[in-house]
């Protein structure tokens, strides 16, 4: 830091220059984030300086957080669910497994997750000193229940199912995982960080939320398909006792038993999440999801027309394309042409997310470039 500060104009000039180096979302097909809805931005700005880590000072922000949690609880099929708005899927997953571990009272335990689980579960193993056991997937890339069953033992503190896998957008058989969890008396966490704001608005109805009796907690991210601002996560528990398992003692705060992982946390995203949910309603989210699915269909049909098959018929707005012989090469050629796409690990494929910022025109342009790249290979 310099002794004498820069003028506001000088600082703004640097900020604008740096912002221009950032990519614009319209050519990004690799991210599960999207620009927030305008009303979410307004709400965030209004509440950005509020701190939900000390909610008694900001009762308005705290009420909006709890109203948003209530709306999410309704959406997830259990209006009495309790929880809080976190910084994202990683924090929600950490906290859910921490609650399960504390409830089980086992310190050197294990957690059984699908092989398709997000890498946040590897962090969880490290942070919570749990062994993360990875269950095999079936040919549709859903978790294989026999494999889950084989990995459970007396030290298992939780099972995890995913509603919208990061790489393929697949939904695990949560109801059958639930049967297993009930049978073994185990905690079941559902990671719906991505799918949570997609599945409730699809025509096809899945059994994946609190409607499945054994589901103990759900991660759901407003900053992904919830159109809210970053950082916007959500963690809901069926049973308030699990939320209590996370409480620390902070006598100097207005809430002396905080349960969030972070201390200071902005009420901006909480206000944004409440605002966008209140404004769009189920109709608005249904329109957004329908449009994303129409774009998904457009991409898959276009890819097929140039001889590129999807790994799976898309379940949600996540597409994995075989792009043989080398998805990596196709990716790097597309990146040279300004398209941000990613790849999956197993099986290897080109991965594209059709977020609300995607457009029909850009998908056509991307497909033209993909056809040209495929011809070169
Ligand atoms: N869970 C799933 C299924 C995800 O897809 C992601 C991120 O893509 C996460 C968790 C982690 O979310 P975050 O990046 O908000 O921490």
Image (tube, rainbow, N blue to C red):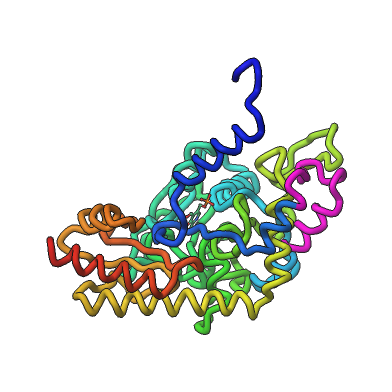
Quadrant for the C terminus in the image: bottom left
Quadrant for the N terminus in the image: top right
Q: Is residue 117 visible?
A: yes
Instruction: Answer left or right for 148 relative to 370.
Output: right
Q: Is residue 49 magenta?
A: yes
Label tally: 0
Q: Is residue 19 magenta?
A: no
- Image coordinates of residue 353 in percent, x first then y, are 41, 64
Relative to 251, does residue 61 appear above or below in the rendering? below
Residue at 19 percent across and 66 percent down: it is 372
Q: Locate residue 281: give its quadrant.
A: bottom right
- Image coordinates of residue 231 in percent, x first then y, are 61, 50
- Image coordinates of residue 226 in percent, x first then y, are 60, 64
Instruction: Answer left or right for 190 relative to 304.
Output: right
Q: Magenta part of the protein: which range?
A: 46-69
Residue at 14 percent across and 67 percent down: it is 375
- Residue at the limit of the structure toward the bottom, as seen here: 203
Residue at 24 percent across and 73 percent down: it is 309
Q: Main secondary structure of the magenta part?
A: helix
Q: Locate residue 81: give its quadrant.
A: bottom right
Residue at 24 percent across and 77 percent down: it is 304
Of residues 24 and 148, the one nearer the viewer is 24
Q: Locate residue 298: give its quadrant.
A: bottom left
- Image coordinates of residue 286 in percent, x first then y, are 58, 78
């Amino acid at each position: 830091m310099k002794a004498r500060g820069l003028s506001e104009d000088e600082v703004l000039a640097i900020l604008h220059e740096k912002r221009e180096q950032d990519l614009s979302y319209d050519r990004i097909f690799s991210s599960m984030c999207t620009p927030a809805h305008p009303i979410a931005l307004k709400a965030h700005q209004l509440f950005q300086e509020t701190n939900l880590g000390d909610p008694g000072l900001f009762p308005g922000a705290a009420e909006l957080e709890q109203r948003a949690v209530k709306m999410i609880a309704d959406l997830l099929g259990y209006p009495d669910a309790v929880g809080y708005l976190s910084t994202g899927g990683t924090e929600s997953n950490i906290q859910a497994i921490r609650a399960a571990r504390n409830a089980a009272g086992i310190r050197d335990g294990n957690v059984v997750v699908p092989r398709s689980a997000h890498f946040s579960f590897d962090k969880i193993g490290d942070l919570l000193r749990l062994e993360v056991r990875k269950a095999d997937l079936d040919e549709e890339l859903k978790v294989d229940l026999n494999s889950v069953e084989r990995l459970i033992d007396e030290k298992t503190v939780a099972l995890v199912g995913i509603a919208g896998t990061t790489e393929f957008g697949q939904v695990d058989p949560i109801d059958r995982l639930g049967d297993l969890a009930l049978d073994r008396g185990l905690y079941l966490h559902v990671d719906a960080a991505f799918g949570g704001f997609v599945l409730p608005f699809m025509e096809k109805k899945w059994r994946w939320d609190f409607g499945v009796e054994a589901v103990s907690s759900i991660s759901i991210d407003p900053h992904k398909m919830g159109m809210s601002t970053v950082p916007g996560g959500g963690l809901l528990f069926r049973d308030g006792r699990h939320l209590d398992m996370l409480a620390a003692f902070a006598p100097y705060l207005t809430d002396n038993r905080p349960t969030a992982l972070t201390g200071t946390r902005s009420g901006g995203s909480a206000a944004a999440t409440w605002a966008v949910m209140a404004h769009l309603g189920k109709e608005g989210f249904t329109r957004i999801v329908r449009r994303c699915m129409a774009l998904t269909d457009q991409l898959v049909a276009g890819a097929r027309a140039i001889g590129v098959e999807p790994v799976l018929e898309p379940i949600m707005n996540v597409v994995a394309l075989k792009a043989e012989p080398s998805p990596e090469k196709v990716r790097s050629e597309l990146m040279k042409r300004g398209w941000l796409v990613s790849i999956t690990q197993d099986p290897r494929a080109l991965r594209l997310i059709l977020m609300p910022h995607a457009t029909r025109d850009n998908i056509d342009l991307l497909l033209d470039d993909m056809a040209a790249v495929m011809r070169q290979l």
